[in-house]
Amino acid sequence: MSEEKEMSFLDHLEELRWHVVKSVSAIFIGTIVAFIYVKWIFENIVFAPARIDFPTFKYMCKLGEFLGTEESLCVKPFNFLVQSRNMTGQFMMSITASFVIGLIIAFPYVFWQVWSFIKPGLKMNEKTNSRGAVAAVTFLFLLGVSFGYYVLSPMTIWFLSTYSISDMIVNEFDITSYVSTVVGMVIGSGLLFQFPVVVYFMTKVGMLTPQFMRKFRKHAIVVILILGAIVTPSPDPFSMMLISTPLYFLFEISIIISAVVVKRKQKAELLADQQN
C-alpha cells in the first residue's frame, strides 16, 4: 500500500500506458480474428436480423399464433437491397464490423484492465463495496449487446425497410448505412445497459438519489414508451411492450440500486457517529 502512495505522476502515466497498450492489443487481436472470418460474420451475423428466419421474428410469429394476432406479429419478407456506392464501402464496413466484434469479444478483458488501474486508488471500504464490478459491468454490457442485436436491430431494420411515403420509392440502402444502424443499436444498447452502474456511482458521490428517480418515474416511462413505439414494426401494443418492458425494468433496478447505496451510506455514517 505504501508503494502505491509513493508512485509519482510519471509512474502512474507509465502504468496507465501499459493498461492501454494491453487493452488495445486485445481489441486488435479480436479484430484480426474477426476479419479473417468477415464473410461468414456478414452472412450469419450482420445480415441475419434482416431475414424473416431470424430467431426474434420466429418467436414473435409463434407468439402471434398463440395470441391470435399473426398479422401484426408475423413479419413479411423484407423488400430492400443493400448496395455499396463507394469503392471503399465494402472494405471499410468489413473493418468496422470486425472492430465491433473484436471490441465485444475483448470487452471483459479491457474493462478488467481499466479496473486494475482504478482499484489501487480506492479506499478499503470502497474496494469491498465495489467487489464484483468487472463481472457486473461485463454482464450488463453483454446483456445490452444481446438486447440490441436480438430486439432493437431486427425491429429497427423492419420498421425502416417497410416504412414508405410513396410506392414510387424503392428501398436500396447503402452498406454503410445498414452496418452503422446495426452497430449503433448493438453498441448503444450495451452502453445503455450500463445505466445501473452509472446510477450506483452517481449515488455514491451524492449526485443522485432514489427519491429523485422516483419523482421522475412518469417522465421516464413516457420516454421508454415513445422509444418502444418508434422502433416496433407496427403500432401493435405487444410489439411495443416487447421493447419497452426490459428498458423499464432496467430503470426500476437502478432505483433499487440507488436506494441500497443510500442505506449503506446512512448506516456507515451512523456507525461513525456512534464511534465518535
Image: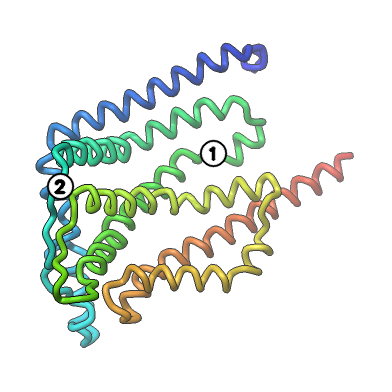
Indicate left or right for 192 with 158 as reference: right
Quarter of the picture containing the N terminus is: top right
Quarter of the picture containing the C terminus is: top right
Residue 42 seen in the figure: yes
Residue 13: percent from left, percent from top: 54, 17
Q: Earlier in the sequence, mark 2 or mark 1?
A: 2
Q: Disc 2 designates what residue?
A: 85
Residue at point 79%, 46% (across, down): 269
Residue furthest right in the image: 276
Residue 161: percent from left, percent from top: 20, 66
Residue furthest bottom in the image: 68
User: What residue type is disc 2 on?
Assistant: Arg
Residue 11: percent from left, percent from top: 57, 12
User: What residue type is disc 1 on?
Assistant: Arg
Please tell me whether residue 189 is drawn above or below residue 215 in the rendered image: above
Q: Disc 1 designates what residue?
A: 131
Please tell me whether residue 176 is drawn above or below residue 17 in the rendered image: below
Residue 62 seen in the figure: no
Please tell me whether residue 226 is drawn above or below residue 72 in the rendered image: above
At mark 1, the secondary structure is loop
Residue at point 31%, 40% (across, down): 104
